[in-house]
Structure formats: structure tokens, C-alpha cells
Image (spheres, rainbow, N blue to C red):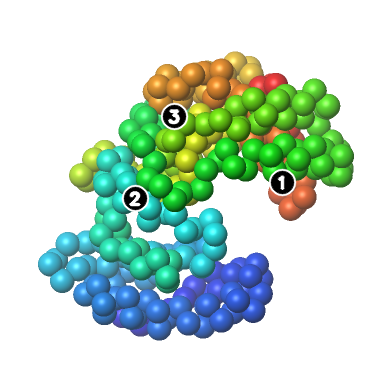
Amino acid sequence: MVIEIPEIFAQSTVAREGERGRVWIESLPGLLDELLQRWNCTPTTPIRHGQVGVVVRVRRDDGTSAVLKVSFPHPGNVHEPDAFAAWGGRGAVLLHRRDDARFAMLLEQAEDGSLADLDDVDEAVAVAGQLARRLAVQAPPGLPRLCDQAENWEEKLRSDAERLPSPLPRHVVHAAVATVRELGKEQPDTLVHGDLHYGNVLRGEREPWLAIDPKGYVGDPAYDAITLLRSRFEELLAADDLKAALLRRLATFSEAAGIDRERARRWAQARAVTAAHWGREYGEPAWLVQATDQLAEMLA
């Protein structure tokens, strides 16, 4: 099978990364071919892509299926294989092979479908919470600690509130700053997925649901609550009582994950403020910024 890099992925990578992106895109076909040969794999489908990487479904020389994933070299992708190795397939796809220098992994192939496809949002939230509980293991050494970012978070929350247009109410930002100051600087040595949204939980054969695309952080498991509130946002916004629906979703996740509901609320509120600031700065759709503002205010 001829390896063709999707044009939209190539263009977005170069637009985002500049010359480094262009050089990497040009080298990617050869890199994929090298990895396929080294790991004795044959591609079975065309390349798929996310924002920062490509995946190819393959067949290994023993006849089993797997997925070859190669990401653009970026600090946010460094510890993904470390997280998979620590979990060892417990609630996440198995890591078969890794090449850290090339940001490449050979992973267990999950099934088609994710939590984003479930009709029952409450069920999806509960499944994500149960996975979060299983993924909350003792973190291996060397992974980035969320507590080390607390001072920078606090400073950025304050500066963004002053710098960006249409600022959030002062008490909403102050609540986020208080959370970072009080909860951010001392956190447990727990492995945290870091991006546990519905699309990052896929159906599996070995287990019913398997997590993918972890960031591999060390810190408070309650840190992940925000991604389940901002995912499937349209369904949340359509509720007759938005605040009640928001708190119910948060309570469902907290109970399933075995985490303190108040900590989850505070982390979600702080991260919602950060997301609202980010949306203003980088031009997210106005409806999404406004909805994130609502979330931050209701959780304050």
C-alpha cells in the first residue's frame, strides 16, 4: 500500500509549525515505511490523522492487528508511551513497541466507536469515571507534575483576565486563582490521563472500553473532570436547567471515579476559566467561548 499523507493534515501541520512542520511532513512517508519494516507490519487501511499525529491500522507478522501511531515531535506528546507502559493495558490500549526519538508507538487496535457515540450521556460520563478510577495508579518517575505548573497557572489567570477582551466577572477569576493556589501546589503522585474526553475512550475487545491519547501527567485525578463537561457541550446546553444538568454530570463522574465532588467542581471551574481565556486569545467560535464562560460562572 502506498503511504499517502492526508493533504489537510500536511497543510495544518505546516501552518502551525512552520519550517519544522514542513521538514517533518516531507520525512513522514519514509519514517512510516521504516517503522513498518522494523516492526514487521503491513498497513491495512489508509492513514488517519488527528491534530498532531497520524495512525495506520496494520497487521503484524503473527497475524494480529495493531495501530502504528506517529506524532509530531512536541513536548505534549513526550510522555504518552510512559503512561501506556504504566497502565499495562489496564483501562487503556496496550503498548506493543515504542520509539521515543521518533515519537512513534505500535499500539493495540481498539474497535470502532467511542463514548461520543453513546446516546445516553449519563452512561458515557459514568464509563469515563470508572476508567479514570482504574487509570489512577502510582505514577512512574520522570513524568511532568501538575503541581510544578501551579505558580505559572496563577500568574497567567491573573494576567489574561487583565489583558483579554470581554473579561469574566472578577469573582469567577478569583475562584479559579484560589483553586490553583490551594489545590494546585500539593497534589498526589497519581498518574492522570490529562485529556479524558469521550472521543479518547474507544470500544475494545479485550475490555469494553479503552483509553487512548493520554498526556501522562502526575497529580490530582479530579483535574480531568473538565473535559467531560466541555465535551458533548451542545447536549448540556440544551438542558432545561443548565446548572442542574452540569452539576449532575459532575456528580456522576465524581462518584464513578471515586473522587471528591468538591475538588472536581473546583478544578473544573479553574480549568473552565483557563479554557475561556484560551478561546478568546485563539479565536474559538463565539458560542463556545460564551458557553465556557457560563460553565465557569456556574461552577464558581
Q: Is residue 16 left or right of residue 85?
A: right
The image shows residue 171 at horizontal and vertical percentages of: 80, 23
Residue sitting at x 54%, y 37%: 227
Distance in Å between CA atoms under marks 2 and 1: 28 Å
The image shows residue 199 at horizontal and vertical percentages of: 45, 45
Badge 2 amino acid: Phe
Badge 3 amino acid: Val
Tell me if label 1 and label 3 are in contact, CB under 8 Å: no
Q: What number is the disc on residue 84?
A: 2
Secondary structure beneath dot 2 equals helix
First in residue order: circle 1 vs circle 3? 3
Residue 184's image quarter?
top right
Q: What number is the disc on residue 185?
A: none
The image shows residue 125 at horizontal and vertical percentages of: 44, 29
Residue sitting at x 77%, y 29%: 173
Mark 2 or 1: the one toward you: 2
Q: Quadrant of the N terminus?
A: bottom left
Distance in Å between CA atoms under marks 1 and 3: 25 Å
Q: Considering only vertical position in the picture, is 244 above or below 100?
A: above
Residue sitting at x 47%, y 31%: 188
Residue 33 vs residue 218, the one in the foreground: 218
Q: Considering only vertical position in the picture, is 80 above or below 2?
A: above
Residue sitting at x 41%, y 26%: 257
Residue identifier under label 1: 278
First in residue order: circle 2 vs circle 3? 2
Badge 1 amino acid: Trp
Residue identifier under label 3: 125
Q: Is residue 226 left or right of residue 89?
A: right
Q: Considering only vertical position in the picture, is 23 above or below 298?
A: below
